[in-house]
Image: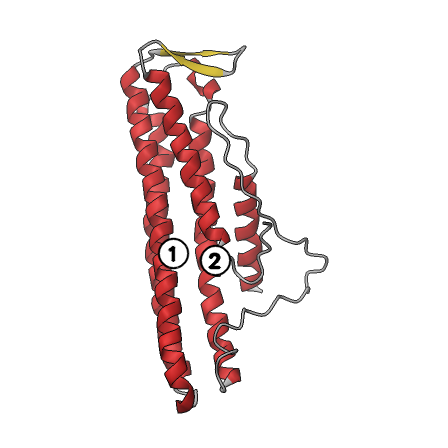
């Protein structure tokens, strides 16, 4: 039940962010992600992909590895869901209508610091999840026939290495997103009110040359990073997440 809850929550938050309204000045990046509606609470979960059990004679033990491996994807999606919740908060703070008054650093610092703290905690938790999976692998391996080890050992190493690489790429994207946002906030504060909000256009205009260009390009960069994160996650969706192509 705990795993079902984690999957549903992660998918819900992930989709909610994907369809959130874009900032008026930003280029639109959209992804298509959804989950099948749960008709009944007891609806059976799909089995984990047979990454290991399809290759080994020790099927029962290998199926445990399939589940452990799939659970790593569930964990990453769960952590990503919290990142997207914070991203949505940060996007809200730079909506054009927020610039009707002069902006101050305290308006951004709370959510920005919380977002960075969330990133650091999620990364540490993800690494701990991988290490836990490695420990479980060693235990399960003891019950797998020796004839399977020649196939299992390089296969497990390959799959975990691939996953670690995806994890590093994802979290580097999130770090890049937050640094880009921090630089944008620094720029906004330095402008010291050299901007105004035009209600008829629902846009922000800057008095200084290049101000609007930097603002717009920065938001476009943020949106693109968010899009690339979702695109990456789409390639490593857990078994019970339905990804529309």
3 and 191: which is toward the camera = 191
Judge whether residue 103 can be spotted in this image: no
Q: Residue at x 40, y 23 (%)?
A: 216
Please tell me whether residue 152 is drawn above or below residue 198 in the rendered image: below
Residue 163 position by quadrant:
bottom left
Q: Which mark is residue 236?
A: 2
Q: Which mark is residue 220?
A: none
Q: Whole-percent x and y of residue 71?
A: 48, 65
Q: Are marks 1 and 2 in contact (CB under 8 Å)?
A: yes
Q: Position of residue 165 (x, y in %)?
A: 34, 58
Q: Which quarter shows the N terminus? A: bottom right
Whole-percent x, y for residue 52 in the image: 47, 76
Residue that carries the numbered disc 1 in the rendered image: 166
Q: Position of residue 96 (x, y in %)?
A: 46, 20
- In depth, the one of 233 and 14 nearer the eye is 233
- SS state under label 2: loop
Above or below 231: residue 90: above
**Which one is nearer the viewer's eye here, 81 or 59?**
59
- In the rendered view, would you say 180 is above or below 193? below
Compared to 150, does 97 lie above or below?
above
Q: Is residue 111 left or right of residue 234?
A: left
Q: Nearer the viewer, residue 131 or 238?
A: 238
Q: For the point 32% across and 34% down, which residue is it?
A: 180
Pick whichever of labels 1 and 2 is earlier in the sequence.
1
Measured in 3D between alpha carbons, the distance from the residue under mark 1 to the one under mark 2, in whole angstroms, is 9 Å
């Amino acid at each position: 039940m705990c795993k079902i809850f984690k999957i549903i929550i992660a998918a819900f938050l992930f989709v909610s962010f994907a369809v959130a309204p874009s900032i008026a000045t930003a280029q639109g990046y959209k992804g298509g992600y959804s989950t099948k509606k749960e008709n009944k609470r007891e609806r059976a979960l799909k089995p984990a992909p047979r990454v290991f059990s399809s290759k080994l004679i020790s099927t029962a033990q290998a199926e445990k590895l399939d589940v452990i491996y799939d659970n790593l994807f569930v964990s990453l999606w769960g952590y990503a869901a919290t990142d997207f919740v914070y991203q949505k908060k940060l996007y809200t703070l730079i909506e054009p209508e927020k610039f009707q008054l002069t902006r101050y650093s305290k308006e951004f610092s709370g959510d920005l610091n919380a977002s960075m703290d969330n990133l650091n905690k999620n990364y540490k938790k993800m690494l701990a999840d991988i290490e836990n999976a490695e420990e479980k692998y060693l235990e399960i391996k003891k019950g797998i026939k020796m004839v399977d080890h020649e196939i299992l050992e390089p296969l497990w190493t390959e799959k975990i290495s691939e996953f670690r690489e995806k994890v590093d790429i994802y979290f580097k994207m999130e770090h890049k997103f937050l640094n880009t946002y921090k630089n944008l906030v620094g720029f906004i504060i330095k402008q010291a009110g050299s901007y105004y909000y035009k209600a008829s256009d629902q846009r922000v205009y800057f008095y200084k040359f290049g101000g609007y260009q930097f603002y717009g390009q920065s938001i476009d960069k943020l949106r693109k990073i968010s899009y690339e994160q979702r695109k990456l996650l789409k390639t490593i969706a857990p078994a019970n997440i339905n990804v529309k192509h």
